[in-house]
Image (cartoon, rainbow, N blue to C red):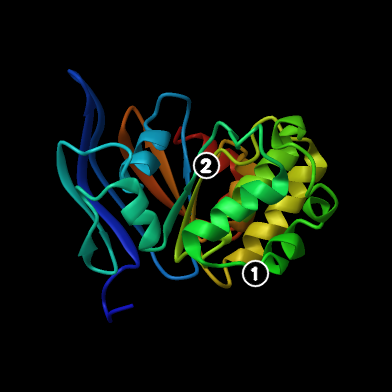
Amino acid sequence: MSPGVNLLEAQKLNVSYGEARVLFDVDFRIDDREIVACVGRNGAGKTTLLRTIAGFVKPVSGTVTADGTSLVGLPAYAIARRGVKYVPQDKKVFADLTVRENLELGSYATKDYDWDQVTGYFPKLKVLMDRKAGHLSGGERQMLMIGRAILGKPRVLLVDEPTEGLAPGIVDQLKEVFRDLSGKTALAIVEQNLPLVCAISTRIYAMKEGRIVAELPGAGATTPVECEQYV
């Protein structure tokens, strides 16, 4: 990463869906090996922010850069090839394919066939390799999606609502996975689980009605109650 340049940064980002403005002059940054969370109520614009960074939504104005290079206008696959991977909220996998075949697709795209890193984080996937992905639980699908995303050693992972609808034990496992992953890659996480956010994040952005209304310290410096007052 170039000196003085953030690993990933959005500046004055404005996004609309038709006539409806969704993001208003959003500034967002993430540096190497940070866990940055974005919190807010449903409809605050959090998912739109991640989807815009990942290239699925084109901004009306503003910039998105990775290591100083503009990402605006690039297709999503080209942004992924530059090391910015998006894990969507919907937990959709290739349901008719096995876990093994889902990982093979991820490996084919990245030329990274080191599945030990995936099963190291998610040992359960090792015994589910021949199961159709459509038969996995929500937690197992989330493991598969994150495992597939880390193939290719991305520099930034954009993870949307990873713990939504998951059992507490899976949430605890993901907490430890995110902490460990942050030693190798930066993570931007959209999440409504405020205790999790306050425990693992380096910094926290609070969004409300399409705007960043606060930037708060993480790593235990902000409590869930303090965080909630901004959203």
Using the image, determine if residue 70 lies above or below residue 26.
below
Residue 43 sits in quarter: top left
Left or right: where 160 falls relative to 168? left
Residue occupying image coordinates x 81% and y 57%: 123
Q: Position of residue 118 (x, y in %)?
A: 69, 61
Question: For the residues marked 2 and 1, what is the alpha-carbon distance in whole angstroms?
Answer: 38 Å
Q: Residues within 10 Å of mark 2 (few under 14, many from 20)?
A: many
Q: Please tell me the numbered disc located at residue 61.
A: none
Q: Residue furthest right?
A: 127
Q: How many marks?
A: 2
User: Which is nearer the eye, 65 or 223?
Assistant: 65
Can residue 35 be seen by looking at this rendering?
A: no
Q: Tell which residue pokes out farthest to the bottom in this image.
A: 3
Q: Position of residue 14 (x, y in %)?
A: 20, 37
Q: Amino acid at mark 2?
A: Cys
Q: Which mark is residue 227?
A: 2
Q: Residues within 10 Å of mark 1 (few under 14, many from 20)?
A: few
- Secondary structure, mark 2, is helix
Give how far across and how far down residue 7 sits, in percent.
35, 67
Report the amino acid beneath label 1. Asp
- At x 61%, y 46%, the residue is 145
Secondary structure under the numbered disc 1 in the rendered image: loop
Q: Earlier in the sequence, mark 2 or mark 1?
A: 1
Where's residue 61, x and y in %? 14, 41
Q: Is residue 57 left or right of residue 204?
A: left
For mark 1, what is the residue?
114
